[in-house]
Image (cartoon, coloured by chain):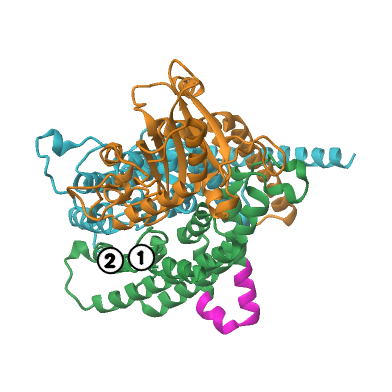
Chain colours: A orange, B green, C cyan
Amino acid sequence: MQRSNIYILVFSAIMTVFIGGAMSLTSVLLKPAQDKQVELDTKKKILGAVMDISTFKTPEEILDLYKGRVKSVVVDIKGKIISIDAKGNPLIAEKVNAQKNHKIARDERLYPIYMILNEFDSNIVEAYVFPMFGLGLWDWISGYVALESDLNTVKGVAFDHKGETPGLGARITEEKVRNRYKENKKIFDSAGNLESITMVKGEGIKGLSVHEVDGLSGATITAKGVNKMLKEYLGCYQSFIKNKKDENGIAIN
Amino acid sequence: MEIFNIVLRGIFIDNMIFAYYLGMCSFLAVSKKVETAFGLGLAVVFVLTLTVPVNWLLQEYVLKEGALTWIDGSFESIDLTFLQFIMFIAVIASMVQLVEMIIEKLSPALYGSLGIFLPLIAVNCAILGSSLFMVQKDYNIIEATSYGFGSGFGFFLAIIALAAIREKLKYSKVPPGLKGLGITMLITGLMGLAFKSFIGVAL
Amino acid sequence: MKMGLQLTRIRLMILNMSAEATVVEKEIKVEKKPAEPFLSKRRKNIVIDPLSDDNPITIQVLGICSALAVTVKLEPTLVMSIAVVFVIVFANLIISLMRNLIPSRIRIIVQLAVVATLVTLVSEFLKAYSYDMYKVLGAYVGLIITNCIVMGRLEAFAMANKPYDSILDGLGSGFGYAWIILTVAFFRELLGSGSIFDFKIFEALGWTTFPTNGLMVDSIGAFVVLGILIWIQRSKSGYVEH
């Protein structure tokens, strides 16, 4: 059907208004629900590093638990707490974008830390959760590593990834693999130097030290990425850990 | 070095066809002869190298949350990401149109060999896919351009290789039900297997 | 002032257009004398043909990209199928309703715009109500826009047929696409991860040492499974490509 140019212009204009309107409307209407999902996702991952949250069914329960048990701060590379960002707005640990953060130089990054408080006495910190970010085989990987109150023993880990191979590298999110980090693994050696934790090459290996965990067969590059991420970020959090230890009077060993 | 890395990854490891299955429609439809496959491949490289950086600019200065601060500081909380799909596809469609017109004016010879493939490209998933992946990977503009070029070149290599095999295949005895699409899928699988060997290459 | 004038003009335009539309519809109504039964044989065929004899994937070779990308597991495949059926049915309906208004010179971009809007809606809904799926499907939801099946149906069917028929056509093509990718996903998940809908089927049957096939979770598995599926389907329907 041939139509005049004016018809085409008006038609396009009306289409644009309709389509733009429909999309903006959905976006505005769904924004609160979306933000809540993103928030829930982050909080689930943080809590997931220290406890089993599969018993909590509704999102509200998880958010309540988080509200009651987690205190978050943001520190810089020297372990100093920062509370406002460059523009003077208050900094919220949960809002720090790990991927963007990872792209800037180490000593300029923001380092969020989540403290899990005791169920009955909120002055006692039971565990510290450190978020981290790195590269796997295909794309990014991220993790939350929880340390016991001695800031040396690993309490638990949670990993996430963008596109690691299902059944191989993607196994880092499996409970079985995550539990390997819980077997009384330490990040510092007896002299107090940061040793981090290494996922070894190969699977089913016996006689691992306190700084090693069993590997993933067929996913060596993902495992290397995890190791590099842990080493890098634990190094960045080292000053905070040292300060906290001095404060709490924990001997370095 | 990083740039080189991204190009190589795009060509061999993150190959649009073998790793992400993007652009399969034209990959299967236009791979019967090497000559036409060459034309389409070139057009894809061309369009990808142009559209990915343009979409990058769009994402960075218009679409993403807080992108409009260059106009005024108070636009900080505006998030237009929901317009991403429609804007990207509009950019791609109009870029393709633009490229077609420019080529027609400047080089009728090139237009003769490339021209007919350009309209096909607007609906090639590899083009839109690259732009969407570029956003997810959080590249800067130079990285984005090289990513566009790399993935385009990966598609180019894949389609020429397949076309060459299919030209030979014409003289082979293939079971009737497997002729055409069926055998092509199996061959693509085998080619993907070959490309998998590049994963081990440490970059 | 100027704005007001423009608005009135647009309103007039809309009035004109709707008037035109009713005229056209009246013409069609005159042409169609005997009322067609709600589910006539012709209409049944519109739905059934794309399921096997004229399947969009195995016969028409359309929409392969997304067919392969999401089929590692059944669950994301199911979500993807629902999304595609939704987009294809509504895009068909909308384009069919507007088919007499769309200027032919800009019809491709109008079709793309409608599809892109629907896909954006799907993506926003997924993000709001099923965030985990949104993360798994990632960019592939956006790629429904360039799924050749959707554009193909709009151009070939909806531009020339009535809304109700177009809905049926959309359902047919959508389900034709869905059952193929669900079958591919079934075999890939079963052999690649040893599970169905994340339920470890072999472990439940007592076969704990089931060797999962790494190639199946990889893209290669998708190509091979789809190739074999096409072979079987074409042998059955007797379709031969020359």
**Kind of residue indicated by mark 2:** Thr
Could you say which is closer to the camera, residue C19 or residue C210? C210
If you read the primary sequence from the N terminus, does the residue marked by circle 1 or circle 2 appear first? 1
The percent coordinates of residue C71 (x first, y second) are: 31, 48
CA–CA distance between discs 1 and 2?
8 Å
Q: Residues within 10 Å of mark 1 (few under 14, many from 20)?
A: many
Residue that label 2 marks: B184
Could you say which is closer to the camera, residue C238 or residue A105? A105
**Kind of residue indicated by mark 1:** Leu
Marks 2 and 1: in contact by CB < 8 Å? yes
Indicate left or right for C238 with A253 as reference.
left
- In the rendered view of the protein, which quadrant contains the N terminus of chain C? top right
Residue that label 1 marks: B28
Return the chain for callout 2: B
Residue span colored magenta: B98-114
Name the residue furthest left. C206
Name the residue furthest right. C1
